[in-house]
Image: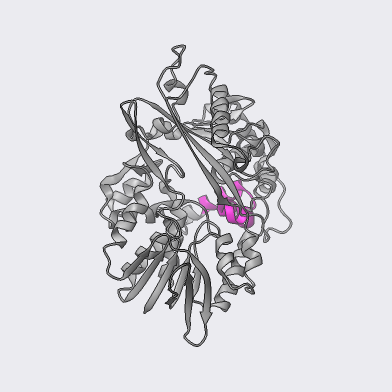
Amino acid sequence: LGSIAVLGGGISGLTAAHRILGKFPNRRVHLIEKSNRFGGWIRSERLNVNDKSFIFEKGPRSLRPKSGRKTLELVELLGKKDEIIFADEEASNRRFILNEGKITPLPSSPLQFLSNPLGRILLSSALFEPFAKKRKNNEEDTSLGEFCRRRLGDQVTEKIVAALVLGIWGANIDKLSLESSFNFLWKVDKVHGSFFNWIMDSVKQTLSGKKEKNTEDGMSPFVANGMKQPVFSFKEGLEALPQMILESIKKSKRVEINLNTSVTSLAFDNTRNQIRLSIKDGEDIWVDDVISSLSAGVLAQILDKNSEAIPLLKDIETVSLAVINFAFFNKDSEGKHLQSSTKGFGYLVPPKEKEAILGTTFDSAVFPQHGGDEIRCTVMMGGDLSNHSRVVDVSKHSEAELVKIALSSFKKHLGLSKLEPFYNDITVCKNAIPQYFVGHARKVEKIEKILAKEFNGKLSVLGPSFFAPGINDSVNKAIDVVDQK
């Protein structure tokens, strides 16, 4: 009963607010967002250029159904099933790595493990993995880099894993927590000791009937079908997801929506057993509970200066990224076709290549529904500056300089020196991706315990600063936290 404030209008905050309104018919919700829009880093833009109409993503660009059951169920609940689009399957399954300066496909068939240079590295690693050293104390967290070098070898780690991690986290694998960033791998290492043992244990459980079968029980036909797809988005881009949630929230008479509203402090009042939110240039708001989806750094700024959580919150670091969108005609000035060079999901660049960019997605191949016959690509740069000497600090360059660096790298990698875009745009995402360093899970546990004590169990935290940065992960966690209220 009573009122609850949701701080932050990104996907975590919106999902939490929507869930509260649906689950607790007697609770009022204050949805508070500092900026002038909802959606957080999710932003899609439809452009009309040169008689062409197409969509570019300025932040996240697609969703993976594997972790997206609750997202799909939410879309169905909102009555927006028809807004979902699925990616081109062939393009989604063709992924590339820059290897020794050349865009090289990751193996996608048994034969390619023999003919493909990256496939041969993976095959060799798989054969020797059962004999790799085990950790002495597998109860403790370790870095992803340590785990992969020990179990998979240096080549797989540096040429493949490090590139994949850059595409997700912009991170240095030797700092990144295995437990918090790739929990499945941590459990494999802790419980089974190796991938081989994990496979054998799974087979034994299946044969003995102890392992639950992966069924579609409880899923609607829409969700079951969606879960089988490689990647999905929406007709008008990913921003359609927060917008459709917001549209539903606005229909309730029990919600107060506050844009351009800054919370300057949070304080628990023992006498009233409530939390006071001080609002910049506004009246205080008193609520019975608070769910914060703010970043760790922002939350630290509004807590009481004596809060024991502040040093821990400030210790959660972030990295910045630049997202550069390019639209090209299908042929360059020499008549070379670009489409054949961009038929796939995109390519990632491992740190050992010491290139200025993190990778490129081939947007028009993955989601042709978002445009026409133009070639759409997105280049990413930035991330952890300790990865190598040529990492671009996106906060210290002008947007024009970043666009120039991105285009130069892209042209070099594709071998199309005469290629010029007819459209480009850039979004610099400062402090966008939190970094889960070794020990992150213990740190979050401490933060939650401290806040529970200081706010009498009335303040919960959500969002990528604490629990997995993906959109699906944010939706899942928001629903779980509300359901535990």
Q: Indicate the position of residue 20 as horizontal and vertical percent values.
A: 36, 68
- Residue at 52% across, 79% down: 268
Count the marks. 0
Residue 437 seen anywhere in this rendered image of the structure:
yes
Residue 453 quadrant: bottom right
Q: Which residues are magenta?
A: 178-204
Quarter of the rendering containing residue 84? top left
Residue 71 located left or right of residue 188: left
| Residue depicted at 31% across the width and 53% down the height | 244
Q: Is residue 134 left or right of residue 429?
A: right
Q: Residue furthest front?
A: 281
- Magenta span main SS: helix
Q: Can you say which quadrant of the picture contains the N terminus?
A: bottom left
Seen in the picture, residue 395 relative to 242 is either above or below; the reply is: above
- Return the x and y of residue 349 as percentages of the image width and height: 59, 33
Q: Looking at the image, which residue sits at the far top?
A: 334
Could you tell me residue 389's position as x and y percent?
71, 36
